Image (tube, grey):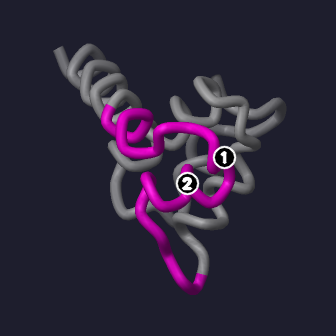
Amino acid sequence: MLPNGMTSQQACSGFKNLGQCVAAIHVSNNLKIPFDDLKAKMTGDNTESLGKSIYELKPDADAKTEAAKATKQAKKNISETQS
């Protein structure tokens, strides 16, 4: 699910936590938003929430629903790796 040539450490650097990173990866894949664009919105100088980042990058998407969906997917992924 990561962009080609990107390690998980590179992908997640700058995010507040693993869940936020994994949710962003899911949004990128679910909505076909370039991960680098999403990451820049969420980890740059003026950080934005996942929902606001979705809204700005793909205004026609239901940002609140998509953020909740990706967060749920991320929680499931993380719990599966910890069991």
Residue 22: percent from the left, percent from the top? 45, 37
Which image quarter holds the C terminus? top left
Q: Residue at position x 37%, y 44% from top? A: 64
Q: Which residue is mark 1?
A: 58
Extreme residue toward the bottom, this view: 45
| 61 inside magenta stretch | yes
SS at mark 1?
A: loop
Boundaries of the magenta span: 45-68
Residue 17, image quadrant: bottom left
Extreme residue toward the left, this view: 83
Q: Are marks 2 and 1 in contact (CB under 8 Å)?
A: yes
For the residues labelled 2 and 1, the Cα–Cα distance comes to 5 Å
Q: Residue at position x 73%, y 52% from top? A: 36
Q: Residue at position x 62%, y 57% from top? A: 39
Image check: 72 left or right of 40?
left
Q: Is residue 18 above or below residue 81?
A: below
Q: Is residue 44 above or below residue 72?
A: below
User: What amino acid does circle 1 point to?
Assistant: Lys
Q: Which residue is mark 2?
A: 55
